[in-house]
Image (spheres, rainbow, N blue to C red):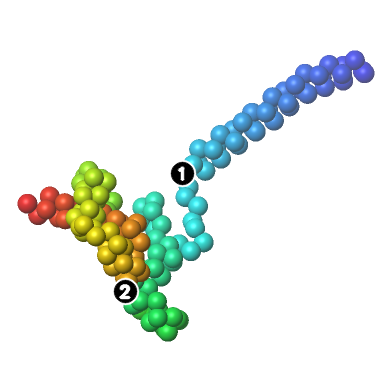
Amino acid sequence: MQAGWQGHKARHGKRSSINTLTLIVCFFTYVGVTGCKQNVRPVDAMARVNNKFILRSQVEARCKLLLGSDRMENLADNGNSLRLAVLQQLIREEIIQQQAEKLHLAATDDEIDEKVAELRGTSTVQFDAQLAAQNLTIDDLKGEIRRVRSEEKLFNKEVI
């Protein structure tokens, strides 16, 4: 009886190990495949346009740009309607940008650099002072140029 049990245990012990290994491989394959498709929602996400999140920090930065830092501090919690309007605008801008990219009409880095050079003119110091006075960085300016230029190209393509 003992020999029979050992043989049964040996045969089924291997099968059990193979089944366990198969389950582990299937689990990690499933997690790997489905995990790659899911976007982790950032803590301060307010909206999502396809796979791009619009963050609270973006909304606050745009509000600050519109109002200036002094008035933004006074706005505090009473600015929900402004924040909602800004969020809606950012959603519209993202939809337009994604459509421009889909149609290969998004502004190129060369176009943006050319426009920055045009705006900068001959006086870098004066240009930097104007950016600082408007609470803008060069990246903010480039982002706005990219948005406007992509929008122009898309609308010209769609209208004509």
Secondary structure at badge 1 equals: helix
Say which mark, if any, is on residue 37. 1
Left or right: where does residue 58 sit relative to residue 18? left
Coordinates of residue 41 in the picture (x, y in percent): 49, 56
Front in this rendered view, residue 143 or 158: 143
Front in this rendered view, residue 82 or 138: 138
The tag earlier along the polypeptide, 2 or 1, is: 1
Give the amino acid at mark 1. Answer: Lys
Give the amino acid at mark 2. Answer: Leu
Coordinates of residue 133 in the picture (x, y in percent): 32, 71
Residue at 24 percent of width and 60 percent of height: 123
Front in this rendered view, residue 145 or 29: 145
Secondary structure at badge 2 equals: helix
The residue carrying pointer 2 sits among few (fewer than 14), some (14 to 19) or many (20 or more) residues within 10 Å by Cα, namely some
Left or right: where does residue 75 sit relative to residue 9? left
Which residue was labeled with disc 2? 66
Left or right: where does residue 30 sit relative to residue 155? right
Front in this rendered view, residue 89 or 127: 127
